[in-house]
Amino acid sequence: MIKFDRVGKRYPNGKDALRQISFELPAGQLTFLTGHSGAGKSTLLKLIMMIERPTQGQVFVEGQNLTGVGSRHIPFLRRKIGMVHQNHQLLFDRSVFDNVALPLVIAGFARADIGKRVRAALDKVGLLDKEKLNPIMLSGGEQQRIGIARAVVNKPPLLLADEPTGNLDPALSAEIMDLFHDFARVGVAVLIATHDLSLIARYRHRLLTLREGRLIHDGEEGVSQRDQDLALYARPREDRRGP
Amino acid sequence: MARNSRQRRPAGARSARTSVGDRLTAWRQHHRDSLRDALGRMARAPTAALMTVLVIAIALALPAGLAVLMDNARAITKGWDGQAHLSVFLKLDTAEDRQRALAREWDGFDTVARTEVITRGQALEEFKTLSGFGDVLEALPDNPLPPLIVVYPKDVAPGQVEALQRRLDNLPEVDNAQLDVAWVRRLHAIIELGDRMISVLTLGLALAVVLVVVNTVRLAIESRREEIVVIKIVGGTDGFVRRPFLYSGFCVGFAGGVLALILISLALWWLGGPIDELLRLYESEHSLTGMDPSTVLVLPLFSGTLGLLGAWLAVSRHLGDIEPQF
């Protein structure tokens, strides 16, 4: 679904945000992406979303090499990617329904179809009865679930989540993770960028760990290896604050 | 999308697809929605919208109103050129027979349409009746008025009339051949100059309208930054993002054009009485005419186009700055 082939990103100021990154995310797999602030998580997500372009190597989404994708086609690429944000990125000038419907309106779905799909997505995240409300009236957990409904409403093959449980308590985080598991089960490739060590420890999923722009760990190897990596990552405690 | 649909994806979620027909319908729908959204935003912030519209209306009403006045001036003075004639004053001692002979002779010129003889006696009578100074003239020993032949040229083009004037002026019997249309010419020159000035004014104020809209739309873009970011994240094209702003630019411009028409009509109504009075004093049958129908139609569209242009400039300049961040 996603393939990074020796990808490097150097910003104009000379800073290497990513170096020689190679990995592949198959369909139906849930993967954690971690690393302290400035390790390159955001840059990696930006490369997938084509907000930035790599300065070295190649990124593939659904087998398509992004190097050849012109800026006019970026919106069409993004329609294949559902994006969930830590701060939800909801629009408070419209209803829950209209927030979730936005990707479908943009993609040009028929009216009747939009209604069906939006209600299916809201049903999935358990907010069917809130469709007419303004998202500002809902709790943080509910807002996050609206964000997820919006990300999956057009059934993208790829779901990216940037600190999806950042502001949520463990019970709500578990609910959100259950949703992600459900999507992975039906074949969506899910990539979750997170600082949340307890979350990573609780689920045994593939883990990609970035440090200073390099991929220092990739896999579900023995717990000892994971703990070692986590300890490595956890050492600079002052860096653990969110972005 | 079509290209990728050919490649088999491993088992997994099938991303939702849309037919061409659906997309066309949705595209039209988005145009409707964008228009409604633009009007809705104006209605929700009426004061701000009215200010912008008013600025545009004033900027357009000024040159358009002046153009209407110029049209009237042109219409009033149009007939005057047709009456262009030369007043050829003969030497005082020219006999009446000689005067008539000359008139007949000039009648034969290619460039002369007709002539009219005004003898010294007739001139005196006319002067008495028109001026009311008859008593004064009677006190004089002699009739001081010269014999006059009024010459109507065939061709009133500037060069032709002057040539005829020079030719007649050089004849021995002629004291002075006076071109009576000189002041009309000057007036026409002034009207011409006025037209040019209106053009310059229109250009400058049209630019001002565009800049007003650029600024308004720039602020609108700034206030809808979050929405733009979200639209870009979920795959909205630049066209999709641009559309509502283009519509609001057009709406503001169009409304400004309509309001300009209203302002001009009010001004014409206000000026109509005094101007008609003035024209009556000049014995003109002309009365103030309003805007012609084409202006009524064109002004709002022109103004709307300026708004569209301003919005387009603002959007293409500022939209690129807004990119999703993590």
Image (cartoon, rainbow, N blue to C red):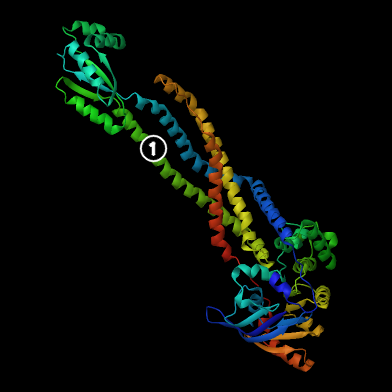
Residue A140 sits in quarter: bottom right
Residue A129, relative to residue A198: is it above or below?
above
Q: Nearer the viewer, residue B306 or B158?
A: B158
Residue A29: percent from left, percent from top: 78, 81
Q: Amino acid at mark 1?
A: Gly
How many numbered marks does the figure carry?
1
Quarter of the figure that contains the C terminus of chain B: bottom right
Residue A58, relative to residue B41: is it above or below?
below
Residue A142 sits in quarter: bottom right
The residue that appears at 54% across and 39% down in the rendered structure is B260
The residue that appears at 41% across and 27% down in the rendered structure is B76
Quarter of the figure that contains the N terminus of chain B: bottom right
Residue B62: percent from left, percent from top: 47, 39
Q: Nearer the viewer, residue A40 or B243?
A: B243
Residue B253, relative to residue A162: is it above or below?
above
Residue A110: percent from left, percent from top: 76, 58
